[in-house]
Image (tube, rainbow, N blue to C red):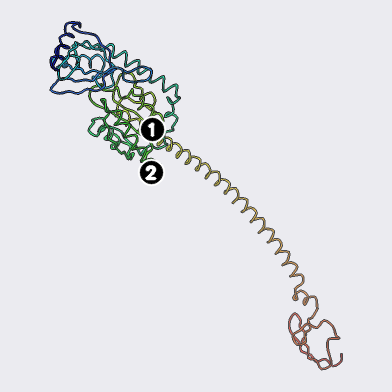
Amino acid sequence: MKEYSLSELCQTIASALETRLSATYWVRAEISSLSLKGGHCYMELVEKANATGILSAKVRAVCWANTYTMLSSYFMFQTGQSLQAGMQILIEASVSFHAVYGLSLQIENIDPVYTLGELARQRQLTIQRLQDEGVMDMNKLHPLPTVLQRIAVISSAEAAGYGDFSDQLQHNSYGFRFRTTLFPAIVQGDRAVASVLSAFDSIYAALEADQQVFQAVVIIRGGGATTDLGCFDSYDLAFYASQFPLPVIAGIGHQRDNSVLDMVVHTSLKTPTAVAEFVINHNLVQLERLTRLHQRLLQTADKRILLLRHRLDKATMRLQMAFANRLRKEGDFLLQVEKTLLLRSPEKIYRMGYTLTRHNGKTVRSAAELQPGDRITTEWQDGTVTSVVEKA
């Protein structure tokens, strides 16, 4: 029995592989992890069972710097995205076996058409899944507030698009005031999904503490090339955004077909600047509406005042006429009283020859009221006579 050292066995395996295998193979796989060192690209490639997602194969792969520089540029030009974890790829690779590092693939070529097809297929599966679950239009059902001022923003703090968005809001020509709160997140690359979901969680926690703290969420990414946008086709991100309790407005800075996130949010716009314009215009529409209502209110008030003034004038005229009639009637009544008094006045009675007799200041109406010796006063029209009663 021949004995082998471990290195001799590894060399035998390497020689056998080199002798028996073809120079290169086209291999379909998913990138499980990817790292760059010294310009070289190191990957871990995996294959998962379709039904269960259980790992069925795993192997290391490397693309040396001179090859990777060319292939990565070509891949980005064709797909609009960089190579990243989670991506399905079709590579041409040679198989090698190293005594220390084991089995690995050395990448010589890559087919971007395959990746584009897989991306499109996965995207369509994601859309179909969201539709089947009935969440595709849920966020669109949230009404925007009449006046939109308190906004939670998910963006990279250093992104030019975030600066443009903030500057346009704060220096709008209408003097509208906005309160924006940034929740920093990575908005491109393989870490973007987890980062954006974490920002959403932070916003939700703030809402639980105070339901009035925010009225809407804005997620923006602006500036640079329209690459590394695969995160916005993520099912997890789209599912979360679709069911968020506030309207979500997206402006992720691209001109290509809408991402899945664009499809599920309340409002999708192309750029952060467009989002700022949308928010300002939304408030402007409300301002114009309030202005029209104010004008209508003033017009209605003016008409009402004119109507009431007309009614008051008519009432005043009726009152004046009624008062004049009352004065005339009262005047006629006083004249009649005056005539009656004149007819009954003592002067007229005196002129007819009648006199007025008083005893102790009281009018004597009957002789029976007097006693002999009583002093009485008799009044004529032209004088008074005092008498003493001798016989009663």
Residue occupying image coordinates x 15% and y 11%: 2
Q: Relative to the observer, which residue lies in front, 333 or 54? A: 54
Crowdedness near tag 1: few (<14), some (14–19) or many (≥20) residues, C-alpha within 10 Å: some
Give yes or no for contact between labels 1 and 2 (Cβ–Cβ under 8 Å): no
Pick the residue in front: 296 or 279: 279
* Residue 325 vertical position relative to residue 388 in the rendered view, above or below: above
Please say if 354 is above or below 52. below
Type of the residue with mark 1:
His
Relative image position of residue 356 (x, y in whole percent): 78, 81
Which of the pair 274/315 is nearer the observer?
274
Give the residue at x 84% y 91%.
371
According to the picture, the residue beneath numbered tag 1 turns out to be 282
Q: Residues within 10 Å of mark 2 (few under 14, many from 20)?
A: few
Quarter of image, res 151? top left
Rendering coords of residue 331 (x, y %): 68, 61
x 65%, y 54%: residue: 322
Residue type marked 2: Ala
The CA span between labels 1 and 2 is: 27 Å
- Residue 9 numbered tag: none
Q: Is residue 371 left or right of residue 162?
A: right
Q: Position of residue 43 (x, y in %)?
A: 21, 20
Q: Secondary structure at mark 1?
A: helix
Give me the disc on residue 209.
Answer: 2
Question: How far across and down, in percent of the image, does residue 167 sit?
Answer: 26, 35
Quarter-of-image position of residue 272: top left
Give left or right: position of 204 versus 357.
left
- From the viewer's perspective, is 128 left or right of 31? right
- Which of the two discs, 1 and 2, sits closer to the camera? 2
Q: Count of labels shown? A: 2
Q: Quadrant of the C terminus?
A: bottom right
Please report whichever mark, 1 or 2, sits nearer to the chain's N-terminal start: 2
Determine the secondary structure under disc 2. Answer: helix
